Image (cartoon, helix red, strand yellow):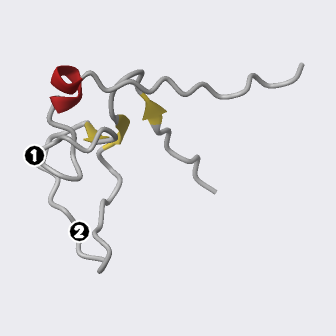
Amino acid sequence: MSQPFTIRCRDNGPLVMPATVQVVDADGNPFPIPPGKEVVALCRCGATKNRPFCDGSHKAMGFTACEKATPPVA
């Protein structure tokens, strides 16, 4: 069984994941990911002009979101 890929929640920014993922719309149609990209950033703020991908608009609008996972119990 292969290892799952990691999705990172960037503080005050997008969700970032390996570009090997396929992003599809509600009808199952894939969004093109340019060849050679190593990561994909998905917008969380809603201000991007390149939905569903991040275009950096979160910086200008002051988007804040700093979710943190619960640390594992030792």
Identify which residue, 55 or 17, lies in the foreground: 55
Q: Where's the C terminus, which quadrant?
A: top right
The residue most toward the front is 61
The local crowd at label 2, few if under 14, some if 14 to 19, many if 20 or more residues have their Cα within 10 Å, is few
Q: Position of residue 54 (x, y in %)?
A: 21, 39
Identify which residue, 27 or 5, lies in the foreground: 27
- Looking at the image, tell me whether mark 1 or mark 2 is earlier in sequence order: 2
The local crowd at label 1, few if under 14, some if 14 to 19, many if 20 or more residues have their Cα within 10 Å, is few
Disc 2 target residue: 30
Residue shown at 32%/74% (left/top)?
A: 26
Q: Where's the N terminus, which quadrant?
A: bottom right
Question: Are the residues tagged 1 and 2 within 8 Å (C-beta)?
Answer: no
Q: Position of residue 27 (x, y in %)?
A: 29, 80
Disc 1 target residue: 49
Vertical arrangement, residue 17 with respect to residue 60, above or below: below
Q: Position of residue 39 (x, y in %)?
A: 28, 37
Identify which residue, 60 or 41, lies in the foreground: 60
Q: Secondary structure at mark 2?
A: loop
Q: Amino acid at mark 2?
A: Pro
Residue shown at 26%/44% (left/top)?
A: 46
| Front: mark 1 or 2 | 1
**Separation (CA) of disc 1 from disc 2:** 18 Å
Q: Position of residue 69 (x, y in %)?
A: 65, 28
